Image: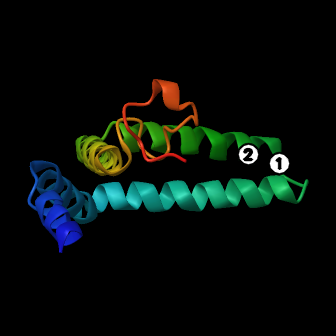
Amino acid sequence: ALAASVGEAVAASDEMKEYEQASAAYGADGELMEMIREYNTDREALAMASADGQADELITKALGDRIAELESDIAHSEVFERYSKAGEALRELMDAVFRAVSEAAYGSGGAEGCSGDCSRCSGCRHG
C-alpha cells in the first residue's frame, strides 16, 4: 500500500505528465519517426557492409556521413529534445524517490552508500 502511494504520487507528478505528453508528441511526429527509421536502417547497412570486409570505401563514407547528418537532425529536433529532457527529468525524480526511500530505510548513507565504517554513519542498520 505504501509503495502504491509513492507510485501514485510519481504518476501524478509534473515530471510524469510532461514525459507522457512529450512521449505522445514523439510518437506522433511522422517526420522524426522516419528519420529514426532511416538512421537505424543505415547503421545496420553500414555494420553489415563493414563486417564482410568487402565494403566499398565510398559507400561506407556516404553511409557514415548520412548517419551523422541524421543523428544531428534527430538530436536537434524540438520534439526529440523535449522527449529527452522529459525522460531525464523523470529519471531524476525516480532516482530522488529511490534515494529518499533508501535513506529513510537505511540511514543517511543509504544501503548502497554504506562503506562499512560505522564511525562516519548517521544511523544505518549495518552489522
Whole-percent x and y of residue 127?
Answer: 55, 47
User: Which one is nearer the viewer's eye here, 79 or 49?
Assistant: 79
- Residue at the location (52% across, 54% down)? 39
Measured along the vertical axis of the image, is residue 48 above or below residue 110? below
Whole-percent x and y of residue 72?
Answer: 44, 36
Tell me the number on the disc at residue 20.
none
User: Which one is nearer the viewer's eye here, 111 or 70?
Assistant: 111
At label 1, the amino acid type is Asp
Q: Which residue is mark 1?
A: 56
User: Which one is nearer the viewer's eye here, 57 or 102?
Assistant: 102
At label 2, the amino acid type is Thr
Disc 2, disc 1: CB below 8 Å?
Answer: yes
Q: Residue furthest right?
A: 53
Q: Residue furthest top?
A: 120
Helix, strand or loop at mark 1: loop
Compared across the picture, whether 39 is left or right of 20 comes to right
The image quarter containing residue 96 is top left
In what quadrant of the picture does the N terminus appear?
Answer: bottom left
Whole-percent x and y of residue 52?
Answer: 88, 60
User: Which one is nearer the viewer's eye here, 85 or 3?
Assistant: 3
Report crowding for label 2: few under 14, some 14 to 19, many 20 or more residues within 10 A (C-alpha).
some
Report crowding for label 1: few under 14, some 14 to 19, many 20 or more residues within 10 A (C-alpha).
few
Tell me the number on the disc at residue 60.
2
Helix, strand or loop at mark 2: helix
Measured along the vertical axis of the image, is residue 36 above or below residue 117? below
Compared across the picture, whether 47 is left or right of 72 comes to right
The image quarter containing residue 62 is top right
